[in-house]
Amino acid sequence: MDCPPIGGYTYVCEDGRCVPTPFGCEYYGNCDGTDEAPDTGPEPDPDSGSYSDPSPGPPIPACASAPSFLVSEIAVPDGPVALVFVEGTAGAMPSLAVATSDRIDGYGMDGALLYEALPLDAGDAGETIASVASADFDGNGRADVLYATADRVGVVFPGDDGVTTQWAPTPLQTSSLAVADIDGDGLADIVGVLDGSVFVVSNLGGGAWSDAVVFAQGDRVTVGDLDGASPSDVAILSSAGLQRWRGGPTPALLDENAVPGDRLFVGEFTAKGTPSAVFVPWPDGEDAAISMVNGVGLWQVYTFTAAGTVLGVGDVEGDGAADVVRVHDGAQLSTARGGVSGLVCESPLTSIGVPIAWAGAALGDLDLDGDDEIAALGDGGVVLLSRG
């Protein structure tokens, strides 16, 4: 039976139910035309709109096939600590920024060194780079690299004539870092966490930054288009659960969910510009389940059949839907494939032949072929995985 349009949304039939396309409407109906809703997880509190009492759903079905990967390695003698994909803009190809304790180097798909920067000088003895992020901070159409030490935050600007560096607001400390245009002025801003307070520092252009403005409490942050409208929004994770905040000159709370977890990721399930979902692996050491909150706050919990740790979220399949990549025993991967209505199935394990770490991984389309590559920290360097 064809699914009828409801409320301006188009529906498709998946697993016997009508689900919206793109994923993002709270209505669910059965394909027999009745309005009986399936069990989609906890119900929100009618007064606050918050969710509570989480419980895992049934295991994700197994996919029929596993993705294959081409494996390459980039030797980094000093030992990498963090990775980020840098989008290719202003005529530049994408790059992979690899941070060690005192430097940031950019590599291409073939492992060639594209740029190098030593942002810490002799006066920074004892200071080390802890995390990196990427966005266009100077508005020239080319993505830059933001890095954070325990005490400060700075920006590396790769260019055709070399690399320049600049310290952002000093001092600016943060234990969790994300970058995006939060206030809607076209320039990338900084979102961070310090001692449980979540703040935003607005990019004023010309190398100028605003003071840090605290707008929430939490432990981890990430950014993305969570409601299908500009500017970028903020997802915050704390011991109390997940909060989603709408971006703007003054961020506004969208909703909050009692989702357990200590890490969070953002991914798009359909085309660019549609609402992103927030993924929170359960904090059980083996990521036995993952919570997903979609563009309208609908919460679903997916259970995995095998132990493994979430490496990241990205479009590994190249079909426009977010996939959840997990690592098993250090040298095997599985991919929980995204679809119109959420995670559809998880692939069998694929051996990659070399050990990788789950922390510090990054996903992005480095070769512009439509699917995301996976970069992870390995023994003595970076392991780069691309679809075969």
Image (cartoon, rainbow, N blue to C red):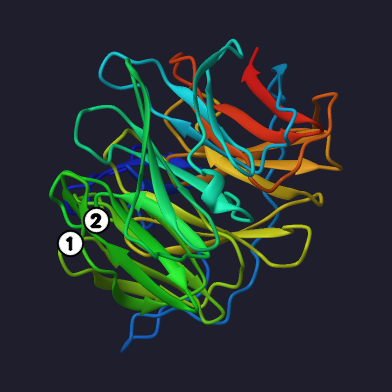
- Residue drawn at x 28%, y 13% is 91
Q: Position of residue 206 (x, y in %)?
A: 16, 44
Q: The disc labelled 2 sits on which kind of residue?
A: Ile
Mark 2, residue position? 182
Q: CA distance from mark 2 to mark 1?
A: 6 Å
Q: Position of residue 227 (x, y in %)?
A: 27, 55
Residue 72 shows in this picture: yes
- For the residues bearing labels 2 and 1, Cβ distance under 8 angstroms: yes
- Tell which of 388 and 378 is nearer to you: 378
Residue furthest toward the front? 123
Q: Which mark is residue 248?
A: 1
- Tell which of 250 and 77 is nearer to you: 77
Q: Position of residue 100 (x, y in %)?
A: 63, 39
Screen quadrant of the C terminus: top right
Q: Earlier in the sequence, mark 2 or mark 1?
A: 2
Q: Position of residue 377 (x, y in %)?
A: 71, 36
- Tell which of 298 and 147 is nearer to you: 147
Does dot 1 land on a helix, a strand or a loop? loop
Screen quadrant of the N terminus: top left
Q: The disc labelled 1 sits on which kind of residue?
A: Gly
Q: How many marks do you count on the picture?
A: 2
Q: Quadrant of residue 250?
A: bottom left
Does dot 2 land on a helix, a strand or a loop? loop
Q: Residues within 10 Å of mark 1 (few under 14, many from 20)?
A: some
